[in-house]
Image: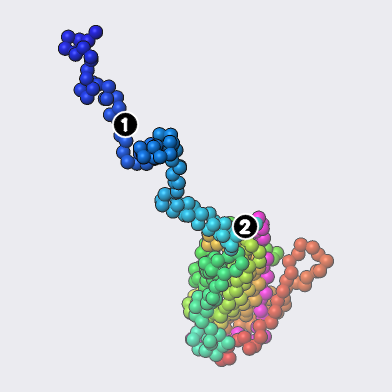
Amino acid sequence: MGGPGDPPEGTPEGAPGGGEDEYRSVVFDESFVRAARLQELSAQERLDDHAPAVRRRPALRRGLSRQALILVMLIAVAFGTAIYMGVRHPYTTPTAQQPVEPLRMTVIPLSPQGAVPGAADAEDLYAHSPAAQFGVGAEGVPLPAARRTAHFSDSQVIAALSTAKDYIVESSLYPAVLTGGQIRPARVLVDPDQLDQFDQSFEHPTADGRHEPTGWLVRFDPSRVQLADRKIRVQGTLAATETDSSTLEVTADGTFVYALRPNGSTASAGSGDKAAQVSLFTVRRELHFRFDRDDLRMHQAQIVVSYVQAGPLSCADDSVTYLRPLLAGQTAKAGGPAGTDPYATGSATALCGTLATSAQPKV
């Protein structure tokens, strides 16, 4: 039964709460009608063809939206680029790194044929020597044009050349190393796997071709000499080559000419003007550096070969720990190093050469 206020037939259609309310959420908009799979025929179509009242509409052809098409194209381009870079990328997976070799060194003293020439002024000596046209300091070792290799970029080749040059400067031109006894400026540039050999060379110097401080650095005996001119004359070259996919090598070949004079105590102990005169000392260094990718990143180098010729020196003097130059007016001492027994294993090879007259200044 209806309520006291309800009509006998119930709530009329259209009134609030009527049956139509449950369909009000359904909106038959134009897109809904067009998407319907069934379509009612017109009255004329039903009379003419005696067809059913409705017919099935063909399915709508739906394509990809523009945004979806662009996204697919971007993914395809990125995928193609990744494949291309994987095929053409110049840097292949690095091979296993070679173990670091110990430095092999040879130091050959050059003995003068007569008295060492001297002069009061270093510039005068340089002007009359083969070093007259040499550069001054680091300028004498210019960096060559760097070209990429099969497995190393331009910047990596430049890094190798720059590190090699820095080692040459710190070990051959830095005054605190030459006469002050410092070793750290060069040590920080050495590959960590060679530091034990480096440290043992200075703690326990030995003429064994492995542990000679003068194979690592140019260092003069500070008790005997001092620099007369800090403008060291230099002529050197650098060249980089790739030995395998994980290794670069740099060869450095340089001639260094130093103006030296006796230190204060030695000069006062000398006699005549010769005791205070300046003389030239020549060092020829050939260094071979090796770099793996860690060395390039850390600005360090493996020094694998050091070949040194230096003079004027006396072959009788020890040149392992320090170079002890013969100064103006001095001559080589009689005698020389002991002969080498080719059948004795483990013994050091003693070498000594003669300093050509043409290598000395003409004064």
Is 310 left or right of 65, judged from the image as shown? right
Q: Judge from the rendering whether residue 255 lies leftward or rightward of residue 58; answer left or right.
A: right
Whether residue 103 is in magenta: the answer is yes
Q: Where 64 falls versus 116 (above or below)?
A: above
The single residue placed furthest to the bottom in the displayed view is 363
- Picture coordinates of residue 272 (x, y %)? 53, 85
* Residue furthest out toward the right: 343
Residue 179: horizontal and vertical position, in percent? 52, 70
Foreground residue among 334 and 315: 315
Name which residue lies at 45% across and 48% down. 63
The N terminus is located in which quarter?
top left
User: Magenta span covers which residues?
Assistant: 96-121
Residue type for callout 1:
Val
Please tell me the numbered disc located at residue 205: none
Q: Mark 1 falls on what kind of element? A: loop
Neighbour class for label 2 at 10 Å: few (<14), some, many (≥20)? few
Name the side, left or right, on which 322 lies relative to 37.
right
Q: What percent of the width, then of the height, locates residue 302?
A: 61, 63
Is residue 31 shown above or below 212?
Answer: above
Q: Which residue does the numbered mark 2 point to in the structure image? A: 94
Q: Residue at x 56, y 88 (%)?
A: 129
